Amino acid sequence: MEPNFKSGTVWTGDNLPIMRGMNSDCIDLIYLDPPFNSNANYAAPVGSTAAGAAFKDTWSLNDIDVAWLDLIEGKHPNLWRAIQAAMCGSDKSYLVYMAARLIEMERILKDTGSIYLHCDPTMSHYLKLLMDAVFGRKNFQNEFIWYYGGGGASKSRWARKHDVILFYSVGNKWTFNADDVRVPHKWNEGQKRADGSKRSEKGKIADDVFQHHSVIPWSKERTGYPTQKPLALLDRIIKASSNEGDMVFDPFCGCATTLVAANRLNRKWAGIDLSEKAVELVDRRIRNDIPLFGGAICRTDIPQRTDLGSIPKYNHPDNKKSLYGAQAGYCAGCGTHFERQHLEIDHIIATKQGGTDHIDNLQLLCGNCNRIKGDRGMEYLTSKLGV
Ligand SMILES: C[S@@+](CC[C@H](N)C(=O)[O-])C[C@H]1O[C@@H](n2cnc3c(N)ncnc32)[C@H](O)[C@@H]1O
Ligand SMILES: [Zn+2]
């Protein structure tokens, strides 16, 4: 499916409704570096180019929407169970927030696509459960380690010096250009193998640990944006897991490291970030990097899907029939059994939040549950998540 947006687009806004507006099966590679649930609030140093950029990395029930729970519990039971495995309320809230977004990423990726989820050991074990539930355990390809070294260290434990990047394919065919990311042998040039044969001059196939310092204060690429990732890291990922002309997408693009790297490698690209400061930086960085490019296409609107032309309106009787079968006649809210005529078709995610008429976004509710749906408060969330 063709994307319903242009290459070079950067949105300012929450990535969830924006991704909901994107066509299915139109992206080749997603790299995401979301907030980590690290209990930190990041802010750029005053006076840096990025001053004013700040984002929250602490989570509570206030960050999640009841409708996301309906969607996950009703349509993605494995994902629901994976979230329940988390220990505390803050972790569960974070995972619900991530789960709602990973569902969209899986949908917009092509069957031959790949996804790299950048996280750190604080949450990587829980995020892997989520990725297994959304992409399938058999599609797990690598735990790619970015070892950055440097900086301070505590004497109470081994120094924490790596991030974890979970690499999944969508299906059983994916791009991996192993030859484009070969690394030099440790051996001297010309040194032979034990059996006398010559080693490949092209270097060896890269392994799953990538060593590269983080963006240091005096580095040319530094924008001052908190958590900026090095271009070298994205260069490797994009070279290996996409081809020229492919669409690369970063839903938490920060200061656009992924987008700049994709552009330099002749890939198409698009990104989203919540922070207005981030989008300003993206535009400036892209203009400076590729003078002829003329800057990014900056948007704030939710795109309109163009791949839904042939699906019926939400209230089509066929939808009611299928949903009644799928729910075995039970209301998706209170769980009471009803005759078909007493159940109403409901959009799980409201259309103004980017929800569609697709049956994946529909459920049957009894009249009472449908009326109180919007008024369910904290108590409901607390009881659902068991926190
Ligand atoms: C860890 S940073 C990404 C840094 C990026 N990889 C770079 O090299 O600059 C996470 C980013 O996610 C953004 N963010 C957080 N929640 C978001 C949301 N719901 N939608 C879009 N962006 C979001 C933050 O503003 C922040 O820029
Ligand atoms: Zn009900």
Image (cartoon, rainbow, N blue to C red):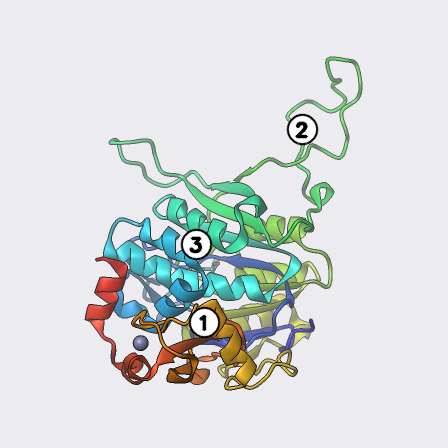
Cβ of mark 1 under 8 Å from ligand 1: the answer is yes
Judged from the image, the secondary structure of the residue bearing numbered disc 2 is: loop
Picture disc at residue 4: none
Badge 3 amino acid: Asn
Badge 2 amino acid: His
Spatial distance from mark 3 to mark 2, Cα to Cα? 43 Å
Q: Give the image location of residue 288, x and y in percent.
A: 59, 69
Which residue is at the front of the view, 252 or 21? 21
Image quadrant of ligand 2 equals bottom left
Is disc 1 surrounded by few (<14), some (14 to 19) or many (20+) residues within 10 Å? many
In-image side of 268 versus 371 (left or right): right
Judged from the image, the secondary structure of the residue bearing numbered disc 1 is: helix
Which corner quadrant holds the C terminus?
bottom left
Instruction: Examine the rendered structure and indicate whether residue 210 appears above or below residue 296.
Output: above
Badge 1 amino acid: Leu
Cβ of mark 3 under 8 Å from ligand 1: the answer is no
Q: Give the image location of residue 334, x and y in percent.
A: 29, 72
Which residue corresponds to mark 1?
Answer: 16
Q: Residue at x 67, y 28 (%)?
A: 185
Q: Give the image location of residue 178, x and y in percent.
A: 70, 42
Which residue corresponds to mark 3?
Answer: 78
Picture disc at residue 185: 2
Q: Tell us which disc is closer to us: 3 or 2.
A: 3
In-image side of 79 versus 108 (left or right): left
